[in-house]
Image: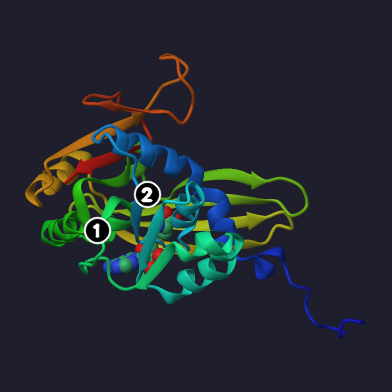
């Protein structure tokens, strides 16, 4: 079939699927499932079965969860129909029929209370930072707590370090090499030291030089770990714990292992987990 003359050739950015790029760049669902098992196991003597993934987006973590055991169920909650529809086609569709039936999705605000209750409630990729006041976060944490069984755990990730407060700071990683390769670009666009409002974007740069800037934009409040722990206590959680990545260069162990700590080095850029026990 001949192409119509004069029609501009599509760039790799034009043809890209932003959710494919996102999942390849920022998500490691098997890692998350392993961490959920560790976190739940630290406070319970049984195996976790029921996951609730708040702010689930394309709910890749729900899919990985049900794949990991035929006894496991997952409930994914997100406001936005677009990533939910994408996830149905690309993530749910890859599961066998039985596993698919163990995933339930709700297009709703995470601040709504639901039944059934979960063993683990995950709120990943800093998503609750969309709530910018203590009152909003505490209200959300109260609802999250009510969506958990006794002994259930809420798992959140956090980031920080001096670099995180630099404006226009970029973190670039090559995600795939070769002619269909691309780079992931995380930009800390703005940070207001007075109210901690922060704007972040995710963009992608492709092998042919084309770019998709601001494929994802986040307008968040930059919360700190002590603030989050205080709000968890205020919302009624019985305890909260911080898991820091094991420094495998100095402390032994392997990359991607997490240990509970009460003190940590002031790295210029870090990510950690906060786990709250109902
Ligand atoms: C940063 S993305 C996280 C996606 C996924 N959890 C991950 O880890 O990659 C944030 C998601 O939260 C959703 N969201 C924002 N506010 C919400 C709310 N109040 N209730 C439910 N979902 C919300 C957005 O639609 C978006 O899909």
- Say which of 98 and 61 sits in front: 98
Q: Is 84 placed above or below 274 here?
A: below
Q: Quadrant of residue 269?
A: top left
Q: Is 167 placed above or below 117 here?
A: above
Per the rendering, the mark at residue 239 is none
- Say which of 134 and 34 sits in front: 34
Q: How far across and down, in percent of the image, does residue 218 sit?
A: 37, 61
What kind of element bears circle 2?
loop
Q: How far across and down, in percent of the image, does residue 21 sit?
A: 59, 57
Q: Nearer the viewer, mark 1 or mark 2?
A: 1
Residue drawn at point x = 47 percent, y = 40 percent? 31
Residue drawn at point x = 27 percent, y = 66 percent? 110
Q: Tell me: 241 left or right of 6.
A: left
The crowd level at tag 2 (other Cα within 10 Å; few <14, some 14-19, many 20+) is some
Reading the image, the residue beneath label 1 is 117
Q: Which corner quadrant of the figure contains ligand 1? A: bottom left
Reading the image, the residue beneath label 2 is 167
Q: Is 58 placed above or below 195 here?
A: below
């Amino acid at each position: 079939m001949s192409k119509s003359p004069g029609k501009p050739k599509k760039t790799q950015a034009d043809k890209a699927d932003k959710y494919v790029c996102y999942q390849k760049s920022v998500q490691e669902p098997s890692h998350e499932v392993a961490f959920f098992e560790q976190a739940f196991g630290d406070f319970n003597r049984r195996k976790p079965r029921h996951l609730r993934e708040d702010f689930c987006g394309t709910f890749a973590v729900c899919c990985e969860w049900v794949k990991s055991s035929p006894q496991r169920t997952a409930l994914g909650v997100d406001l936005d129909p677009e990533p939910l529809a994408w996830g149905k086609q690309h993530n749910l569709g890859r599961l066998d029929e039985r596993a698919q039936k163990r995933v339930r999705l709700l297009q709703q605000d995470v601040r709504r209370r639901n039944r059934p209750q979960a063993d683990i409630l995950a709120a990943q990729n800093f998503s609750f930072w969309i709530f910018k006041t203590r009152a909003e976060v505490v209200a959300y944490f109260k609802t999250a707590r009510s969506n958990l069984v006794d002994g259930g755990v809420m798992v959140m990730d956090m980031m920080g370090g001096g670099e995180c407060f630099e404006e226009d700071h970029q973190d670039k990683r090559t995600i795939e090499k070769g002619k269909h390769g691309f780079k992931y670009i995380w930009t800390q666009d703005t940070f207001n030291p007075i109210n901690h409002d922060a704007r972040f974007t995710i963009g992608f740069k492709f092998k042919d030089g084309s770019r998709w800037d601001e494929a994802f934009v986040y307008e968040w409040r930059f919360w700190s770990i002590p603030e989050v722990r205080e709000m968890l206590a205020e919302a009624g959680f019985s305890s909260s714990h911080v898991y820091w990545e094991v420094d495998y260069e100095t402390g032994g162990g392997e990359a991607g292992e997490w240990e509970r700590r009460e003190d940590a080095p002031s790295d210029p850029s870090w990510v950690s987990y906060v786990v709250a026990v109902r």
